[in-house]
Amino acid sequence: MPALQATLNATDLFPSDMLPDMLAPFLAGKEDTQHWLTCEKDDHAIGFCFAKGEEMTDGTWNMLAIAVHPDHQGSGAGAALTQAMEQTLKATNARVLIVDTSGTEDFASTRQFYAKNGYDEEARIRDFWAAGDDKVIFHKAL
């Protein structure tokens, strides 16, 4: 877990002290409601992807987090994690994968990443995260 926390600290995705609580259900064997994948290089975790099933839906999942350590961004690790998550979810009969991100300029490369990996911008909720910071929702049929 320390390598994943280091990735979180380096990417500033969310506070790394949240990671143990996020991982707890998965580590307790609840793989049917959430999936965690890690990406390693030289036996060292350099990234992760986390998706959770959306309650009260038929096969809709939400990719709540994907992060690759900045030293390895642009290497294809993020695309590989995304594709691996999609394959994992397809095997469980998932139909749809959504992901949210920010509409600010700081997240322009994130939005480009999702578009490049086959996700379509489905919705935008104005001022969701903060004034001037829209929530952008991407969608991909599995």
Image (tube, grey):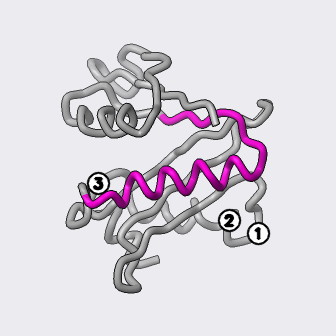
Residue 16 sits above or below residue 13 on the image: below
Q: Secondary structure at mark 2?
A: helix
Q: Secondary structure at mark 1?
A: loop
Q: Quadrant of residue 40?
A: bottom left
| Most foreground residue, 118 or 73 | 118
User: Which is more foreground, mark 1 or mark 3?
Assistant: 1
Question: What residue type is disc 1 on?
Answer: Gly
Is the residue under label 1 in contact with that under label 2 (CB below 8 Å)? yes
Q: Which residue is mark 3?
A: 12
Alpha carbon distance from label 1 to label 3: 28 Å
* Label 2 crowd (10 A; few <14 / some 14-19 / many >=20): some
| Most foreground residue, 40 or 130 | 40
* Residue at x-position 34% and y-position 31%: 102
Question: What residue type is disc 2 on?
Answer: Phe
Residue 77, magenta (yes or no): yes
Q: Secondary structure at mark 3?
A: loop
Residue 63 sits above or below residue 135 on the image: below
Q: Which residue is mark 2?
A: 26
**Of callouts 2 and 3, the N-terminal one:** 3
Q: Position of residue 135 (x, y in %)?
A: 41, 25
- What is the span of residues highlighted in magenta in the rendered image? 75-99
Q: Position of residue 49 (x, y in %)?
A: 49, 56
Q: Which residue is mark 1?
A: 29
Q: Position of residue 24 (x, y in %)?
A: 64, 67
Residue 15, magenta (yes or no): no
Alpha carbon distance from label 2 to label 1: 5 Å
